[in-house]
Amino acid sequence: MKIRVGVIGPKDSVKMIIDTGADYGELHFIPFVYESTEETEQIIIRNREWVDQWLFSGQAPYFYALSKKVITKKEASYIPLSGASLLAVLVKVFLDSDQVQKRFSLDTIQEEEMDRGLDPLVRNRVLFQMNSYDGYMPAEEIIAFHKELYESNKVDVAITCLNKVYKELTKMNIPTYRIEQSELTVRRSLETIKEKGQASWYRKSQLVIIGVERIVASSESEERRRSFRLKHQELELKKVLLDVGEQMNGSIVQMDDGVHYIFTTRGELELFMRDQSMLTISEEIFVHSRLRVRIGVGFGLTVLEAEENVSMAFSHAREFKGPIVISVNEEKELTIINNEKEEISFHSRIYGNDWEKIFKDAGISSKIVAKIESLSLHYQKNKITSQDLSHWLKSTDRNARRILMEMEKIGLAEIIGEETGHRGRPRKIYQINFNQFAKQ
């Protein structure tokens, strides 16, 4: 199966990339030509279903698309401009001019690239006024940079990496040259795209099991569990799951009373989740059946691994009172999606003998501390009270105080003050420190 590569850039750059990639039989190129960088967003939104990997002609459209969150780094690459490409432009400038030009304005290319591509003799005898930026910068700002330098007689020639900048400066009768990608850098980028595309295909075919478990209230009687009303509700639940399974091209198996598994692939799950959250399934079930469910998602390279991970997800999900979605991937990383649509990830495995020794005689597990560490990073907060922790863990204030006291005993937290201004005794403020012990 060929990897579908969407090539985005100005017309000449797109053509050059596709011509260079003609001998890459594993890649199928789809050209997307634009006049300005800002068109990138809509190009991707309209055509993402037909593309496996995106290849951008340069830094500007790539980082613009990233800033708009229409791509991720895993599904896209861009062709960098090298110092060697700049050297080729300088040679052209010298050949086109009656006199040797030594003052240039230059955008986009980084200092280190110039050092790699230009001989020190050239580098030291030619003056460059540089606008080296990270990420994306609007073309208008780059045009203004070159224009101001030229009009103030600080440079003789403008060198740009952007097609729009080149066209606008040329209209202003400013001597302008454009740096283009070399065949070598294009081929390197195509190799990267091929590797990322193959990895993406393997990833999409990975097995996923979505487990849906009915939440049984402790007050629910045996009679209620056998009632016809409940059986009708469970039929409504199954109808929702049948719709979900159909959308994911999966199969549904009832594993136990109130427990169903949907078997599908990561690619189908990601497609389903483009327009909705996994919590949508839980909400749909409640609307149609008035039943509350918890959802565990297990990823795996084998059926056994996926089943083990969905069981682990359920084990963690049962610690919460209400509906929750927890997924466990092949690296044993847990991701929690709560009712606030927040996604919080942490590893269930904490490696290292030294780390495990800390918890040998402690009143808390390394698992709960790993979760607190992840939540601390998520909320960017390492000074907390028991009320903060109870909110994070969806537990009682009493339980949070106990956890913090245990963390203090083993050196992972220390009291640094008190919080007043509320009813009752002042709350202790803890500084939590996970860097004190090495996890290796």
Image: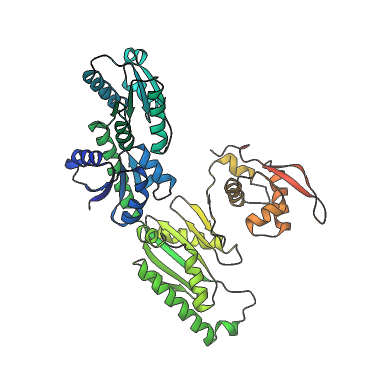
Residue 171 visible within the image: yes
Q: Find residue 377 and report its horizontal and vertical position in percent.
A: 58, 45
* Residue situated in front as seen by the camera: 24 or 346: 24
Locate residue 107: give its quadrant: top left
Q: What residue lies at 23% left-to-right and 15% top-to-bottom?
A: 98
Image quadrant in which you'd find residue 387: bottom right
Percent across and percent down for residue 350 are 54, 46
219 sits left or right of 178 in the view: right
Residue 262 percent coordinates (x, y): 40, 68
Q: Residue at x 24, y 36 (%)?
A: 187
Would you say 413 lies left or right of 200 here? right
> Considering depth in this image, is 158 or 127 the residue closer to the camera?
158
Whether 374 is drawn above or below 232: the answer is: above
Total number of numbered discs in the rendering: 0
Up the image or down, 12 lies above or below 227; here it is above
Q: Let me know if residue 80 appears in the view.
A: no
- In the foreground, 158 or 6: 158
Residue visible at 44% across and 45% down in the picture: 67
Locate residue 212, reporting x and y percent: 48, 69
Colour scheme of this structure image?
Answer: rainbow
Q: Is residue 304 above or below residue 440?
A: below
